[in-house]
């Protein structure tokens, strides 16, 4: 008997282990035992579970709360059941139906709890899916009820269900529809075959779609886009039909209205079009016959189909200019679509011809005619703007280049290029304004046009620059043409009582002698123009190879000069100045020298003009000023006699607004006392009296000496000389080279003038004893020149200063 009970217990234990997840926990909820089935479901090992609470599997599970409730139960022997959702180790959820059995001691108090759990995850998921599906079906039914007309019929077509939307459109209440067929709302619009096809389709188990016109209870008609879905039994026989309809009445009515308008009001519509629409065909003899011609263009031109179909001269298309239209018209009758432009009665049109085919034969041609008169005018305006100068109306650079290249390619005649520039045109713009400047340019263009032959061409290339192509290369004839142009343009212009004068300079190159392509000819003419302006303006010069070589050399020198300072190629030589009475050295003049690393010493006569033209004189002049002042200060610190340092200043430097600032900054930087600096300016700088007086007065206030160099060769008025704070006048050496009676008189006048104004006189370029003796008799203050010393580099000047000191 005992043995049998033991076997029963073993069988019960095996059954529990195979079917259920078994766990044992103490009254605090701590897990004491789990079987293999429990570990398999939770994916945790027994070691991971034993000693933990059920909160490991259910984070929201509160073991303290649950087990206190179970421990305090008034019937502790009661077995409890509950559905518990837990989470496996990999994060997937699972559900169990837990049966919790309390283990009671002799006093009836729970000591442990055995939980026997059955996995019901599949049931839970299936239930959730069913609820979601049911909800989706309910939502779908609601959406269909709001948007569509729904009806259900049996296999014989008897209505079993209609939704409210069906009743709303048909205007029948539900009770009048149920038990009836759809014949109740038949409009009679569709033929019998229409519905036969529908029943044949759905009875075979297929879905039918179509557009159906119905009649409501009040007699009004409405259209439905209908889909009928059959529901079949296991044998494939339909037992029910569901129809889903949408209202398309508005769309059908719009289409019908459009069709009616196209049929009945086509001519009225096209008659109001801005353009024209026409149709034509050919009769048996091949003669074109217009069947339709409408549009406002026709009214504007006075064209009608009757007029065009009329034979004889009254037919507008008998005109010569419209013969081209006939060829296109017959091409379209041959099956070829055409597009072309046509000019007629001062109007421009674009015409499209489209053949209409039937059985691969052209039965008629449909055409449209669009007026493009304004577009053609705009195109011509754009073309004119692209190739002509807006101000003068002359051809621009693009058109001129095209014409020259075409002339070169034709190689029929030689020609000359004249590059013309207006001298000092900027002064007119600055002083009289751009309006007068533009009027001058237009007048010059007009005069140029009158100077040209019938095959010549004038162009405004930019600003005040013009280029001409003259169909002549004979030097004498081209010379005469140039003189005539200069004379004509140099005559005065009058604008609003303002009389204006302007002169041109012209550079000339000839094809093919001076170049065989456009760019070369234009460049060489520009080079010749540069020479003309350099030689006094208001003249003309022909291009020569020698001129080109000089320009190339000059350009290369300018490129090297830009780097001379950074390459330490610039030097300063110093020419001593002596007191004629005592023979003592009073100062030196700092003279810039360029010692090119490859070409050696380059004459100041070569590089100084290049520096002036290019603007490089500004950095070079500043470098000379700073270097000379630093040298003068260094000599003083070395114990040499304190002598005056004279530095030449160019007109570009003198006119700079920052000139005085630069001078004072250099003195501060080098530490040279201003009294030892002498600024030398040319006489021409003083022509602007007000500006010069302000600058010179400021230099004087700072204690800086100022000399007027090359005095007697400039244009200053002697009456202003007394107003300038000048310390020295320098007599130009040109007067000493020839001591004729006139030159000696000039020298004497200059010295006397200076004495009367208490200004010292320095004579430069003294080379002979005769010149020195003459100057001495006139009581000239100081001299410099090769008779005393040539300009010397720093080291030789220092040797000379040492002898003076000794």
Image (spheres, rainbow, N blue to C red):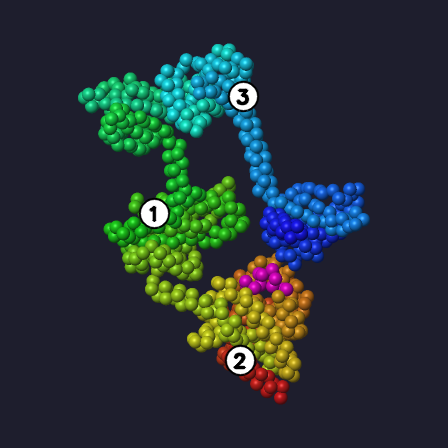
Residue 605 at x, y percent in the picture: 46, 70
Q: Residues within 10 Å of mark 2 (few under 14, many from 20)?
A: some
- Residue under the image location 52 percent in, 18 percent down: 169
In the image: residue 149, left or right of residue 297: right
Q: Which mark is residue 163?
A: 3
Q: Which image quarter: residue 643?
A: bottom right
> Could you tell me which secondary element the residue under label 2 belongs to?
loop
Give the camera-side residue of 270 and 761.
Answer: 270
Give the camera-side residue of 106 and 80.
Answer: 106
Q: Residues within 10 Å of mark 1 (few under 14, many from 20)?
A: many
- Residue under the image location 25 percent in, 30 percent down: 335
Give the camera-side residue of 207 and 416.
Answer: 207
Please state the extent of the stretch shown in magenta in the rendering.
651-661
Q: Which residue is mark 1?
A: 457
* Figure check: 698 above or below 426: below
Q: Are marks 2 and 1 in contact (CB under 8 Å)?
A: no
Q: Nearer the viewer, mark 3 or mark 2?
A: 3
Q: Say whether residue 653 is magenta.
A: yes
The disc, 2 or 1, on the residue closer to the chain's N-terminal end is 1
Q: Which residue is mark 2?
A: 793
Q: Residue placed farthest to the right in the image?
A: 107
In the image: residue 314, left or right of residue 546: left
**Image quarter (top left, top right, bottom left or bottom right) of the C terminus:** bottom right
Q: Residues within 10 Å of mark 3 (few under 14, many from 20)?
A: some
């Amino acid at each position: 008997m005992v043995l049998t009970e033991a076997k029963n217990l073993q069988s019960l234990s095996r059954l529990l282990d195979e079917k259920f997840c078994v766990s044992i926990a103490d009254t605090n909820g701590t897990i004491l035992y789990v079987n293999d089935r429990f570990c398999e479901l939770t994916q945790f090992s027994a070691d991971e579970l034993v000693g933990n609470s059920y909160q490991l599997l259910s984070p929201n599970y509160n073991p303290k709360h649950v087990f206190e409730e179970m421990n305090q139960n008034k019937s502790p022997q009661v077995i409890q059941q509950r559905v518990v959702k837990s989470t496996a180790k990999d994060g997937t959820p699972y559900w169990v139906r837990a049966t919790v059995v309390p283990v009671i001691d002799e006093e009836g108090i729970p000591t442990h709890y055995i939980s026997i759990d059955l996995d019901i995850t599949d049931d839970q998921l299936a239930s959730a899916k069913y609820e979601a599906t049911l909800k989706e079906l309910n939502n779908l039914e609601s959406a269909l009820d709001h948007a569509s007309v729904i009806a259900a019929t049996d296999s014989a077509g008897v209505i079993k269900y209609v939704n409210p939307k069906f009743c709303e459109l048909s205007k029948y209440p539900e009770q009048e529809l149920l038990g009836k067929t759809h014949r109740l709302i038949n409009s009679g619009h569709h033929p019998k075959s229409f519905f036969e096809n529908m029943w044949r389709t759905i009875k075979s188990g297929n879905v039918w779609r179509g557009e159906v016109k119905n009649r409501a209870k009040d007699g009004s008609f409405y259209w439905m886009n209908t889909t009928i879905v059959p529901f079949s039994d296991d044998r494939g026989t339909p037992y029910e039909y569901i129809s889903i309809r949408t209202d398309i009445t508005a769309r059908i009515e719009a289409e019908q209205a459009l069709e009616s308008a196209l049929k009945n009001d086509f001519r009225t519509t096209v008659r109001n079009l801005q353009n024209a629409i026409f149709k034509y065909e050919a009769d048996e003899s091949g003669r074109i016959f217009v069947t339709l011609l409408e549009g406002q263009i026709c009214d504007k031109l006075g064209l009608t189909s009757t007029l065009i179909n009329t034979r004889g001269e009254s037919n507008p298309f008998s005109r010569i200019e419209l013969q081209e239209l006939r060829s296109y018209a017959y091409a379209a009758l041959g099956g070829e679509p055409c597009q072309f432009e046509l000019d007629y009665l001062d109007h421009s049109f674009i015409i499209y011809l489209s053949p209409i085919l039937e059985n691969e034969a052209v039965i008629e041609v449909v055409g449209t005619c669009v007026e493009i008169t304004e577009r053609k005018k705009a195109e011509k305006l754009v073309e004119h703007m692209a190739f002509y100068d807006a101000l003068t109306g002359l051809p621009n650079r693009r058109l001129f280049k095209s014409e020259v290249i075409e002339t070169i390619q034709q190689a029929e005649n030689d020609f000359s290029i004249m590059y013309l520039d207006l001298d000092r045109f900027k002064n007119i713009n600055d002083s009289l304004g751009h309006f007068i400047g533009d009027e001058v340019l237009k007048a010059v263009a007009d005069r140029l046009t009158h100077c040209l032959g019938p095959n010549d061409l004038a162009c405004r290339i930019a600003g005040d620059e013009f280029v001409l192509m003259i169909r002549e290369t004979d030097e004498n004839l081209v010379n005469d043409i140039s003189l005539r142009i200069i004379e004509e343009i140099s005559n005065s212009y009058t604008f609003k009582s303002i009389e204006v004068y302007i002169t041109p300079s012209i550079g000339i190159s000839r094809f093919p002698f001076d170049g065989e392509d456009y760019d070369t000819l234009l460049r060489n003419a520009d080079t010749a123009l540069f020479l003309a302006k350099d030689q006094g303006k208001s003249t003309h010069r022909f291009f020569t190879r020698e001129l080109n070589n000089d320009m190339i050399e000059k350009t290369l020198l300018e490129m090297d000069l830009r780097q001379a300072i950074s390459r330490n190629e610039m030097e300063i030589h110093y020419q001593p100045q002596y007191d004629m009475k005592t023979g003592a050295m009073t100062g030196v003049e700092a003279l810039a020298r360029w010692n090119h690393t490859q070409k050696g010493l380059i004459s100041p006569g070569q590089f100084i003009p290049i520096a002036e033209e290019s603007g490089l004189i500004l950095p070079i002049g500043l470098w000379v000023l700073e270097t000379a002042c630093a040298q003068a200060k260094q000599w003083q610190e070395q114990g040499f006699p304190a002598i005056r340092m004279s530095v030449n200043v160019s007109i570009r430097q003198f006119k700079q607004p920052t000139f005085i600032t630069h001078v004072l900054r250099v003195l501060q930087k080098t530490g040279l006392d201003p009294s030892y600096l002498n600024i030398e300016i040319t006489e021409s700088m003083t022509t602007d009296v007000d500006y010069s007086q302000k600058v010179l007065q400021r230099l004087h206030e700072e204690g800086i000496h100022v000399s007027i160099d090359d005095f007697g060769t400039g244009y200053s008025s002697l009456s202003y000389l007394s107003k300038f704070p000048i310390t020295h006048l320098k007599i130009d050496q040109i007067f000493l080279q020839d001591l004729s009676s006139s030159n000696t008189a000039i020298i004497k006048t200059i010295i006397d003038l200076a004495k009367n104004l208490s200004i010292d006189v320095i004579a430069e370029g003294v080379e002979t004893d005769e010149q020195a003796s003459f100057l001495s008799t006139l009581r000239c203050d100081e001299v410099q020149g090769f008779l005393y010393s040539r300009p010397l580099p720093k080291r030789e000047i220092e040797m000379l200063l040492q002898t003076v000191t000794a």
